[in-house]
Amino acid sequence: MSKPGQVCPLRYHYGPAALAVAPERPAETLYVTGGLYGNRPALDAVEVLAAAEPGPVTLCFNGDFHWFDIDETAFVEINERVLRHDALLGNVEAELLSQGGEAGCGCAYPETVDASVVERSNQIHACLKSTAQRYPSMLAGLSKLPMYACYRVGGVRVGVVHGDAEALAGWRFDANALDDPANREWLASAFLGAGVEIFASSHTCLPVCRRFDLGGRFGWIINNGAAGMPNFTDTQFGVITRIGTTPSPHQRLYGGNLGQVHIDALALAFDTDRWEREFLACWPMGSPAYVSYFERIRRGPTHSLTDAAPSGW
């Protein structure tokens, strides 16, 4: 039986058909910023990138904008600033709203993830929930957020989710799942069922970008991994997704084009010294978040640009 942290609750499920009937929001340039994880310097950096764009930018925070921000001042600031823009529920926010603890952190970790990692995530979320419960009006605001959204960028329909096309905490937009030939039929049906050409997601915490030949047309999946943490070995920048009708004024890490629409992964360079100080003030050595994340914050995960996006597009 799945334990807290490995459960994907029924309330998380929506399916591609729900995206097919979702209203479209127009955007010239769309920034998809998943996995901010309570990192205020990273939020500052997103706003700086957006301000440098030549035209209007729609910011969509597609979940898990809270996580490490157990400090009340940080929690309030993150919540207020994010909710000025488009925002979706991630599992972190969804479980702040739950009355029970059967889902734990709501990550729905695969069985291959070590039990100690799952338990620490549950402990982190419990601390965050204790902070959040002091702000019922903010929880009321979070309760109004959707689990998915659709945008029209140029002539392309974009489905933005936290997890995958099926569920808020789904893992089928993870690199391993996307590269598994056994999932190809499901992927084709997800694009068709949702009526989108691009899926943008985050949940799995490691970035990936893939283009699929759907028989006469292409479908793209771009997962930004984490805006608020390093994503590649020996780096300290976050990653966000940019989808726009014009070329990015910022150098891209990788990406491509779908017709006239530009699909880019952008590096999010933030004040790492400040972030480390804020993190350690909440999560000192030996704490659950320190054990699980501090090495990644300092040196990045074992993941490369080539892992995220193969060359040759």
Image (cartoon, rainbow, N blue to C red):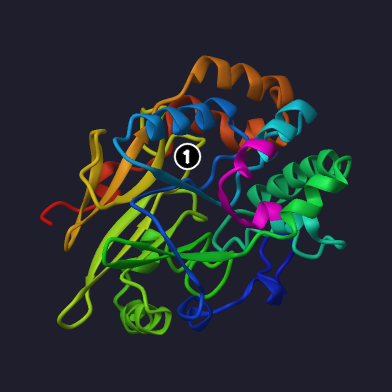
Q: Identify the residue position indicated by label 1 in the image.
A: 227
User: Label 1 neighbourhood size at 10 Å, few (<14), some (14-19), many (20+)?
Assistant: many
Q: Residue at x 52, y 75 (%)?
A: 166
Amino acid beneath label 1: Ala
Residue 172 lies left or right of residue 79; in this view the side is: left
Vertical comparison of 253 with 14: above or below: above
- Rendering quarter of residue 181: bottom left
Q: Is residue 99 magenta?
A: no
Placement of the N terminus among the 4 image quadrants: bottom right
Residue 225 lies left or right of residue 98; in this view the side is: left
Placement of the C terminus among the 4 image quadrants: bottom left
Q: Is residue 81 magenta?
A: yes
Q: Residue at x 47, y 54 (%)?
A: 202
* Residue 48 on image: x %, y %: 42, 27
For the residue labelled by badge 1, is the local secondary structure a helix, a strand or a loop?
loop
* Stretch in magenta: 80-93
Q: Residue furthest left?
A: 312
